[in-house]
Image (cartoon, rainbow, N blue to C red):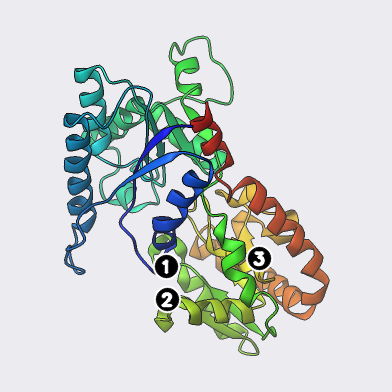
């Protein structure tokens, strides 16, 4: 069994990072590993725009002290639950300088290589950020991505290559290929957490489970609501709900709706499927490989506002079908849930790489 140092994420109780705080250490311990969790400071002002930087800087200091006191040894594993972490460069520096060979694992959530993400929109392809992300990637032994979609976007926009096929003129192809791992995320707890909400009485509710952000196109959802007043349309974030209140709303909803332009995994629609809510998602992004055909609508229906207006009648017809024939989709929702649980919300491949 391995000696593992876990560099965790700052916990937001409203998101999965709050649950990761306890779940990932338990997952590693249950697999027989010795685990040291490296946390950042707990006294960060809640309104700080740089809370991530403050938290990660504290982790770098702790990690450095573990090296200087000899607690990190050759053969150990270090897991960064967020690959966008300056400590990865510091770790590589210490490992090489002191000749302490550790295996570095990291989970990629997003970056400047995604044009729809905050970093992509605000910073884009500036040399400094692209070189930084490339350095992170090169310093990590096992780069984990939750979907093939995310891998393809990362490799094309950041590495400038297609890892799905070997090319004669790309000398780094094999080296890069061996560093990329398509693995589910460590979210085995979701089904157990939501079991309490699985058999609630369904209402004619359509839920928008995402953040209100430009890439999630909430304006499409609200326009649909104005055309279909016979149903209750709810933007979850507008309600400022507790976690329990949100899960109750999810359990009562018949449809979870997405028109996202940015998604490399998608937790909220999986949560909906677990409690027997129909996921209605576009056939693009990570949804293409994850969703069954029953629950995907053509991408062009919501690729932009103008495209939505052109296809509005088709979307309305699809919503009506789901709502009026809800019971007919239950078996397929269960099939969808099993696919997601096995392939996309299990850390099995990450654990396999630590085992050896």
Residue 156's quadrant in the figure? top left
Residue ID at (49%, 65%): 305
Residues under numbered marks 2 and 1 in contact, where contact means CB atoms less than 8 Å apart: yes
Q: Which badge, 3 or 2, is on the more N-terminal residue?
A: 2
Residue picked out by circle 3: 273
Residue 202 horizontal side relative to residue 37, left or right: right
- Crowd rating for badge 3 (residues with CA inside 10 Å; few <14, some 14–19, many 20+): many
- Crowd rating for badge 1 (residues with CA inside 10 Å; few <14, some 14–19, many 20+): some
Residue 102 point in image, percent of width and height: 34, 25
Residue picked out by circle 2: 237
- Residue 198 in view, yes or no: yes
Residue picked out by circle 1: 211
Mark 3–mark 2 Cα distance, whole angstroms, equals 19 Å
Q: Nearer the viewer, residue 174 or 30?
A: 30
Q: Which badge, 3 or 1, is on the more N-terminal residue?
A: 1
Q: Nearer the viewer, residue 326 or 15?
A: 15
Residue 78 horizontal side relative to residue 267, left or right: left
Mark 2–mark 1 Cα distance, whole angstroms, equals 6 Å
- Helix, strand or loop at label 1? It is loop
- Crowd rating for badge 2 (residues with CA inside 10 Å; few <14, some 14–19, many 20+): few
Q: Nearer the viewer, residue 34 or 127?
A: 34
């Amino acid at each position: 069994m391995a000696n593992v140092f876990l560099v965790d994420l700052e916990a937001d109780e409203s998101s999965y990072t709050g649950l990761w705080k306890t779940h990932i250490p338990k997952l590693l311990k249950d697999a027989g590993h010795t685990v040291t969790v490296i946390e950042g400071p707990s006294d960060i002002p809640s309104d700080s725009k740089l809370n991530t930087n403050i938290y990660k800087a504290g982790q770098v200091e702790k990690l450095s002290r573990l090296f200087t006191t000899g607690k990190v040894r050759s053969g150990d594993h270090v897991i960064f639950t967020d690959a966008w972490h300056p400590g990865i460069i510091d770790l590589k520096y210490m490992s090489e300088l002191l000749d302490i060979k550790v295996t570095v694992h990291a989970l990629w959530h997003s970056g400047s290589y995604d044009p729809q993400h905050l970093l992509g929109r605000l910073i884009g392809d500036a040399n400094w950020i692209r070189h930084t992300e490339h350095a992170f990637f090169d310093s990590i032994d096992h780069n984990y991505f939750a979907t093939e979609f995310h891998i393809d976007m990362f490799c094309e926009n950041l590495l400038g290559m297609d890892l799905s096929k070997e090319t004669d003129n790309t000398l780094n192809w094999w080296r890069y290929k061996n560093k990329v791992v398509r693995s589910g995320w460590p979210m085995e707890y979701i089904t157990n957490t939501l079991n309490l909400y699985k058999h609630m009485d369904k209402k004619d509710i359509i839920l928008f489970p995402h953040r209100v952000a430009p890439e999630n196109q909430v304006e499409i959802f609200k326009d649909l609501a104005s055309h279909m007043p016979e149903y209750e349309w709810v933007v979850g974030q507008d309600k400022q709900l507790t976690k329990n209140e949100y899960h109750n709303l999810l359990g009562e909803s018949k449809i979870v709706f997405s028109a996202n332009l940015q998604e490399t995994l998608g937790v909220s629609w999986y949560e909906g499927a677990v409690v027997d809510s129909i996921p209605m998602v576009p056939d693009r992004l990570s949804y293409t490989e994850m969703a069954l055909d029953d629950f995907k609508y053509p991408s062009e229906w919501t690729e932009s506002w103008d495209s939505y207006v052109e296809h509005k009648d088709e979307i309305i017809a699809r919503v009506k079908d789901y709502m009026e024939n809800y019971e007919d989709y239950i078996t397929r929702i269960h099939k969808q849930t099993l696919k997601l649980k096995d392939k996309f919300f299990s850390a099995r491949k990450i654990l396999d790489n630590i085992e050896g």
